[in-house]
Each structure stands twice: as C-alpha cells, then as structure tokens.
Amino acid sequence: MKVLVPVKRVIDYNVKVRVKADGSGVDLANVKMSMNPFDEIAVEEAIRLKEKGAATEIVVVSVGVKQAQETLRTALAMGADRAILVVAAEDVHTDIEPLAVAKIIAKVAAEEQPGLIITGKQAIDNDMNATGQMVAALLGWAQASFASAVEIAGDAAKVTREVDGGLQTIEVKLPAVITADLRLNEPRYASLPNIMKAKKKELAEKTAADYGVDVSPRLTVVKTAEPAGRAAGIKVGSVDELIGKLKDAGVI
Amino acid sequence: MAVLLLADVNGGQLATDSVAKTLSAVKSLGEVHVLVAGAGAEAAAAEAAKLDGVSKVLLAGATDYSHGMAEATAALIVGLAPGYAHVAAASTAAAKNVLPRVAALLDVMMITDITAVVDADTFERPIYAGNAIQTVKSSDKIKVFTVRTATFGAVAATGAAAVETISGETAAGLSTWVEDKVAASDRPELTSAKIVVSGGRGVGSEADFALIEKLADKLGAAVGASRAAVDSGFAPNDWQVGQTGKVVAPELYVAVGISGAIQHLAGMKDSKIIVAINKDEEAPIFQVADFGLVADLFTAVPELAEKL
Ligand SMILES: Cc1cc2nc3c(=O)[nH]c(=O)nc-3n(C[C@H](O)[C@H](O)[C@H](O)COP(=O)(O)OP(=O)(O)OC[C@H]3O[C@@H](n4cnc5c(N)ncnc54)[C@H](O)[C@@H]3O)c2cc1C
Ligand SMILES: Nc1ncnc2c1ncn2[C@@H]1O[C@H](COP(=O)(O)O)[C@@H](O)[C@H]1O
C-alpha cells in the first residue's frame, strides 16, 4: 500500500508572530520556517506503517512556494521515499487555501492511487483544521480525523480519535484519509546520514496549473490585527493575599 | 435566507450551552434552523426547540447520523444546504470533523473558529494560535463556519419552536462506529464552566493531579490541563486547553505548574481573571496573569484549597 502525506511549510512553532503595522498580514520575511508539527507526526506514522510492513511506499507532497522544497527534504530525511512539490505561489506571504490545496491533493491521489492519505490535523499558521476532511470529501473516501492511534487490518483501518468528551474508535474502509493529532506518535529526528541520502531522493516539481486547479482565494483578507492585549497584573506575596484579591474581584 | 445550525449531540443529550452561544453569534444573520442528527435524539431536539432565536428544529433520527459519523452527516447537510446562506456550528471536535467535508462537497471554503460576525459575508477569526486576528470576506454562495463559543453569551430558553422530522442522504459502507470512551464527570463542563483550574507538567504525576482536582472541587470548577500534562499521562486528552485543545474564557482561570507557552495561552487568554501559581518567577504565564503567586505548588495549592 502506498501512503500519501501532505506536508506544509509554516512558521516555526517557537517563533513569536509579528503582525505587520499596516494590517496587511503577518511578517514572514527572514523568519524561521519548519514543517507543520502535525505533519511531522503524519510522516512519522507513515514511516511506522512501512516499518511494520503495512505500507510499501511513502510519497510526500507540498503545495505552496518553491521554498517548500526544504520541508519535503526534511520529510525525505525522516524516511519518506519520494516527494512532489506543487508550486502554486511565488510570494511567501501567499497562503493557498485548504479548498485549493485539497483539490490539488485529490488530483495527486488520483494519479498516485494511494491506499491511505495521512494529513496533519491542522496547520499552525491558518489554524483552519480543514484540508484532510476536504480531501476525503473530494475523493468520496472515508475520513478519520484527529487520530491518536491507527491500526491497519486488511482493507480497513481502525482509528482512535481524540474527541471533546474523550476518545472515539471508528473503522474506516480503505482508501481513506486520516488526520494526525498530537498524541499519535513522537516524530523522529532525521540522522545526518539520512539527511545526506535524502538529497538523492526524487523530488518532482509541478504547478497548480498542471493539475488544472484554480487556486484563487475564496476568502479575501480584509485586515490582520493584533489581538487585544491584557492589562499588566500583579504578584501576590501569599495564599491569603491571593484569596483577598479574588474576593475583591468578586470571582470567588 | 436562513442559517442552518448543526447541534452537537452526545449520547442523546444536546450540548445546550454551545448551541445557545452559537445562536447568539449567528442571530444577526437571519432565521435559524437547528439540525439535530442521530438516533434517540428526540429529547435533544425538544431541548433545542426551547432556545430563543430558533425558528425550527430539524430532527434527522436515522442511526447513520449517530455518533457524529462524518460521511453520512455531511451528506445529510449537503442535501439541506441549498436552502441556506449559512451553515454553522459551535467549534467542537464533532463539527470540525463534519463541516469541512460539507464545505468541500459544496465547493466552498471552510471558515473555522470565528470570533465575530461582521456582516453576512465577513467574519473575524484568530490565526497563528491567536497571535493575530484576521477579518475575512467570503465570496462563496454558502458560508460554512464554526464558532468559538467562549466569548459569546448563551441565549435564554423561553421559546417553543416546532420540531420537524426529516430524512436525507447517507453514505453507506464507508465507515463504522466502534466505541466511544467518554468519562462521566460530576464537574462542570470545561468550555462552559465559570471557573477552570488547570495543571501542567509541574504537577509531576497522575497521582499528584489529585491536588488540582481537589482545588477545582473546592471552587466548583472544571479541570483543565496543558499538553505536557496530557502527554505525560497526568490527565485525559479531553482536558487539554490550548491552540489544539479546548478554548475557554471563564470568569476565573487558575494555571498551576504551567509555563505559559503560546499554544497554551491561545486557549485561555480571554479569561476574565487569570491566576498563575508557578515556582519560576520568570515563567511567561505571569505576563498574562492578573494575580501571580511565585510558590511551590505542592504547598500553595493545598493551602489554597484548605483556606477557601
Ligand atoms: C503544534 C503544537 C500544538 C500545541 N498545542 C498545545 C495546546 O493545545 N495546549 C498546550 O497546553 N500546549 C500545547 N502545545 C505545547 C506547548 O508548546 C508547551 O510545550 C506546553 O504547553 C507546556 O506545558 P507545561 O506548561 O505544562 O510544561 P512546561 O513548559 O514544562 O512548564 C512546567 C512549569 O511548571 C513549573 N513548575 C515545576 N514544578 C513546580 C512546582 N513544584 N511548583 C510550581 N511550579 C512548578 C515550572 O516552573 C514550569 O514553568 C503545543 C505544541 C505544539 C508544537
Ligand atoms: N499547502 C499545503 N501543502 C501540503 N499540505 C497541506 C497544505 N496545507 C494544508 N496541508 C495539509 O493539511 C493539514 C491541515 O491543514 P489546514 O486545513 O490548513 O489546517 C496540514 O497539517 C497538512 O497535512
């Protein structure tokens, strides 16, 4: 079974995000970029499936700017076999919307015929939490979102999902789309030899036009603003003082 | 045109608070029809019919729609959607599972976690873990969105809308429900509680998390946790507060042994009063805390629980 893993290049999760003064967006110039953390988990899960013999080949795909090559190389260094870069934007500030990304991934899936697609649960830049579910919809496949455990058995996958009240287990018919939640696994670091090896792995370059997908946005960003700040607080010296303050504030 | 609001139903029970808050978020958009889906949801439908601002409840009682199964529920909503300008739900795990599937089938964008409705096409939503607020205008014919309920008030329950039984498309054979592992609790629900007490990695163990729970029970509070506390097995996954967990905005939020990473702040920084108890006076959590106590939690928390 072939596994397809879409990976997104996003601002590193440790970087403090700065909103541009003119309200036009967030400043991404000279900022550290990394693979979306949930996508590292998705890549790791695919590698583990391959190590267990449930998967035979792992293809990673990224949609965005040319620099997403680096993200794909990281995935190849972790253990993916092959990569596809779909160039759909030139400016690093252009974010391709989940609907357009999903259409491209669905087209890639039609070509590659994977038995499973594993996406991240959410991209930590737009926080949309939509692409995986959208890919499943466009392909008419089953979906298992927010996965914390995956077991492949024949032509089905048993997936434990993190839901609001606890955990839910469902069984999906393959091919299917799974979206990875935080506790699915702990992604490995790429070793130096594997980073070297990854440089020789195949990385095909395509464009959105190759797949006939119109990536123009459906949502126009009217403005981007800083969130309201909080007034500075105080330090209290003791538990008694804390209780006094909470009583004064009327919350206890 | 009307709004179709997908209600969250768990084990036959309506998530009344989240529906009531979503109603207040969408009421400016027109008349609201609430969709209650799943077998055994009659009581939930009756409960939804009482909420102010609901003009009709649609009850789709087929078992295919039970347990929030995405494929069938999305097919049902797609069948109804042409009659609506907006399809909305509270930002719950259930809605985030189903609505993006609906949006893609309708060929429209998903708009996740809105915090304000500006007009019929324009919405505000946080991005980058709440470090920026984006205002977006949709050009799609139907707007599909989820609402962050934490900052909205709940509508009252003085109404009496009609309940109409409906049926619709399903998606046979794609997926099957196996089980739900949902812990019953006497404590208030995390996203609607007036007070939340959360523990982090500093609590150190599952056994010591009892300190957090005891303080919470003293305050009649819900219990939350940081990702590190959940990953370490101190607390269950559904207690996680943050960018990828639950978003809360209670009257009082008490963070114990939590450093204050942006991903955690994303889930609680709109709380009215924030208290931080941490032994490291440099911990970033103190930058958002109204009242900070630099102390060892193993002495401060029992003392606080006892003196309350
Ligand atoms: C993609 C992604 C998503 C994430 N989503 C979330 C999310 O939704 N929610 C979330 O919480 N995190 C999330 N995180 C993780 C986040 O970055 C932090 O790692 C996490 O919040 C840290 O948890 P913590 O504060 O409990 O642990 P730590 O950062 O280890 O802090 C522990 C704190 O306890 C204090 N302490 C230790 N012992 C004591 C004592 N005896 N008395 C008093 N204080 C003590 C320490 O001083 C320290 O400040 C996410 C990360 C990523 C990459
Ligand atoms: N531009 C992209 N290229 C490749 N994968 C993407 C892209 N955008 C989103 N994804 C995938 O979809 C998941 C969810 O993203 P989102 O719906 O944007 O929150 C991510 O974790 C990725 O796996």
Image (spheres, coloured by chain):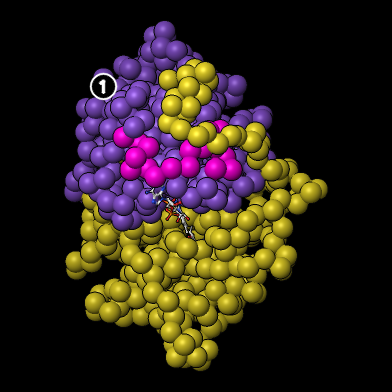
Of the chain colours in the picture, the one used for chain A is: yellow
- Left or right placement of residue B230 versus residue A4 in this view: left
Along the viewing direction, whichever of B251 and B49 lies nearer the viewer: B251
Residue B107 visible here: no
The reply to whether residue B163 is in sight is: yes
The region drawn magenta spans B286-302
The chain letter corresponding to purple is B
Residue A19 falls left or right of residue B80: right
For badge 1, the amino acid type reads Glu
Residue A63 image-quadrant placement: bottom right
Residue at the spot 55% in from the left edge and 50% down from the top edge: B282
| Count of marks, rendered view | 1
Q: State the residue in front, B91 or A124.
A: A124
- Image location (x, y in percent) of residue B67: 27, 39
x%, y% of residue A4? Answer: 41, 71
The residue tagged 1 is B42
Q: Nearer the viewer, residue B172 or B5?
A: B5
- Image: B156 above or below B272: above
